[in-house]
Image (spheres, rainbow, N blue to C red):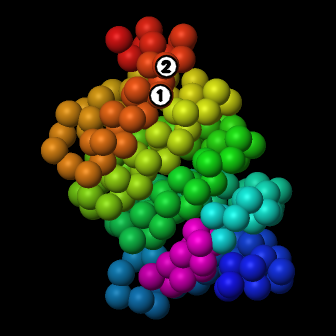
Amino acid sequence: AYRIRLRALEAAAPLLNLLDSLERIPETGSRPGDNRLGPAAALMNLVVDDECKTQVLRHVDGIHRFLALLAEGNADPLRMVAAMALGNLSGQEECAACISDQGGALALAQCLTASDCGLREKAAGALWNLAARDVSADALLQEEVLSLLMQRAEARCAAARNCVCALTALAAKPRGRQAVL
């Protein structure tokens, strides 16, 4: 019910603006990224809804803001929320194309080396979504992205299954089959 209420208020754009504003304010929490965790988590929940995905996509730098959160090396809870939001967004064709066009495949693949297993799992899930879509699959064929996917697929962790599924989705595509083999 809260998603419907927030969507009715068109909350996606204001939350994106809030994230941007909080980035310029000194940290108040005990961990890096704490002051942006609330708005980022609210956006993550909102982008389950297709209308909200479209709002984020149409907002100036909407997807780029989530990609920027992934780059924050010492803020794993914030990075995990960003990976989850990108996973939700990548479920829509237009958003998946935008994520891959903005370098999201590599940014997500780099999260596969993080120490936080939850972050690795969510990033791998988003990569699986991107691999399953024709408009974004080619972005995963970059050598570094494939290498990181293959390394994590061989590991014993929760992310391994998602990595195997992403590689399987890529192998099902003509160009991907050759790259994966």
Looking at the rendering, the stretch of residues picked out in magenta corresponds to: 34-45
The overriding secondary structure of the stretch rendered in magenta is: helix
Please tell me in which quadrant of the rendered image residue 73 appears: bottom left
Q: Determine whether the residue tagged by mark 1 lies in a helix, strand or loop.
A: helix
Q: Residue at x 78, y 76 (%)?
A: 7
Based on the picture, tell me whether residue 39 belongs to the magenta stretch: yes
Q: Can residue 178 be seen by looking at this rendering?
A: yes
Based on the picture, tell me whether residue 47 belongs to the magenta stretch: no
Q: Is residue 19 left or right of residue 129?
A: right
Instruction: Verify CB contact (< 8 Å) between mark 2 and mark 1.
Output: yes
Q: Furthest-left residue in view?
A: 156
Q: Quadrant of the N terminus?
A: bottom right
Image location (x, y in percent) of residue 67:
56, 54
Amino acid under label 2? Ala
Q: Residue at x 62, y 48 (%)?
A: 91
Quick one: 45 or 72, which is closer to the camera? Answer: 45
- Residue neighbourhood size for the residue with mark 2, other residues' Cα within 10 Å, grouped as few (<14), some (14–19), many (≥20): some
Image location (x, y in percent) of residue 66:
59, 59
- Could you say which disc has been placed on residue 1 in the image? none
Q: Height in image: 123 above or below 16?
A: above
Q: Can residue 142 be seen by looking at this rendering?
A: no
Q: Which residue is mark 1?
A: 169
Q: Is residue 142 left or right of residue 53?
A: left
Q: Determine whether the residue tagged by mark 2 lies in a helix, strand or loop.
A: loop
- Could you say which disc has been placed on residue 172 in the image? 2
Q: Furthest-front residue in view?
A: 1
Q: Height in image: 180 above or below 129?
A: above
- Residue neighbourhood size for the residue with mark 1, other residues' Cα within 10 Å, grouped as few (<14), some (14–19), many (≥20): many
Amino acid under label 1? Ala
Q: Furthest-bottom residue in view?
A: 28
